[in-house]
Amino acid sequence: LGLSQPGVLIILPVLNEAENIDPLISGIRRELRGWRYTICIIDDGSKDGTVDIVLRLSREADDIVLLQREKKHHGSQRGGALKYGLEWGLDNTDHEVFVEMDGDLSHRSEELLTGIAKISEVGWNVAIASKYVSGSRVLRRPLFRRLLSRFSNRTIRMIVTLQVRDWSNGYRFYDRIAAEIVRQHYIRYGSPIYLTEVLALWIWKGLHVGEFASTYVARNEGFSKLRWVDLIKAGIAVCEIGLRFHVAGFRLTDAEWATERPAQG
Ligand SMILES: Nc1nc2c(ncn2[C@@H]2O[C@H](COP(=O)(O)OP(=O)(O)O)[C@@H](O)[C@H]2O)c(=O)[nH]1
Ligand SMILES: [Mg+2]
């Protein structure tokens, strides 16, 4: 113990999670006691006091970094928040294992050490705490959300690749190689489809992606939260991602392109 333990970055996008953030942080702290870790919280303008709670918790120990952004448009900016946290981690830490999880207690901190071990001991580049492998469980999720998730995942598998079962999963672990790949490439979506886009990019780049059994505890997944426009947009996005995966390829950012191929002249 000790020397071989990697540093861990927890990337936590939150929007109005006042009820959940305290028990979640406690859970993470309990699991990672004795580890070197940073909890990077990205808030996009919560109005329910989430930020005050985070600030209070951050005075108890120096394991929390709060990044505050502004809400620029209506839909969820969870993808943009994840990318922001990832880049912050690359620039400001030397942590070797990056973890993304939801701030609403759907993802159990009891599974952190299992996921971290898949990266640091087993050697996968990316590990997904999957809802759809044998041994996985999905609790308290309304039937229509279950069916929608099954249907979406099946569709994405057919369009992109069968290699992964849980494409819409937000509880995942990866190494710095995977994080660098995200930074180097042009990422199109800041919405939750970001999760699928980035996963497709990782597979396209040939990274080792694995899934392990996980228990997902649904929180506040009522019908009212779903908007048809978002579903339709997601459907179009999946086709576009499939096109890049199979035909066009994922392209480097202009900055990356410039460093790889110095301008001639
Ligand atoms: N920073 C940020 N976090 C968000 C935003 N939208 C959702 N989240 C967080 O992303 C996580 C997943 O969102 P949630 O609404 O639970 O999505 P669902 O579980 O797929 O229905 C939660 O921790 C939310 O607080 C956003 O626009 N900005
Ligand atoms: Mg949720």
Image (tube, helix red, strand yellow):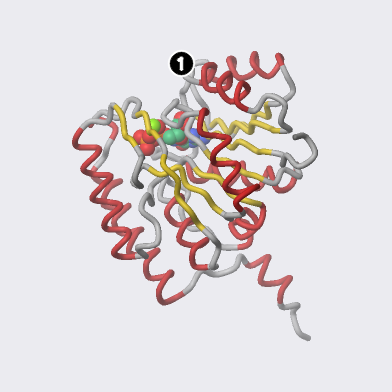
In this view, the residue in front, 17 or 155, is 155
Q: Amino acid at mark 1?
A: Glu
**x and y percent of residue 8 in the render?**
67, 38
Describe residue 259's horizontal placement relative to residue 152 as left or right: right
Q: Residue at x 64, y 16 (%)?
A: 57
Q: Residue furthest bottom?
A: 265
**x and y percent of residue 40 in the render?**
63, 33
Q: Secondary structure at mark 1?
A: loop
Category of crowding for the residue at label 1, using alpha-carbon neighbours closer than 10 angstroms: few (below 14), some (14–19), many (at least 20): some
Q: Residue furthest front?
A: 1
Give the residue number, with chain letter if any, for mark 1.
Answer: 19
* Screen quadrant of the N terminus: top right
**x and y percent of residue 13 in the render?**
52, 34
In this view, the residue in front, 198 or 162, is 162
User: Which image quarter has ligand 2?
Assistant: top left
**x and y percent of residue 51 in the render?**
58, 20
Q: Reply above or below: 47 against 215.
A: above
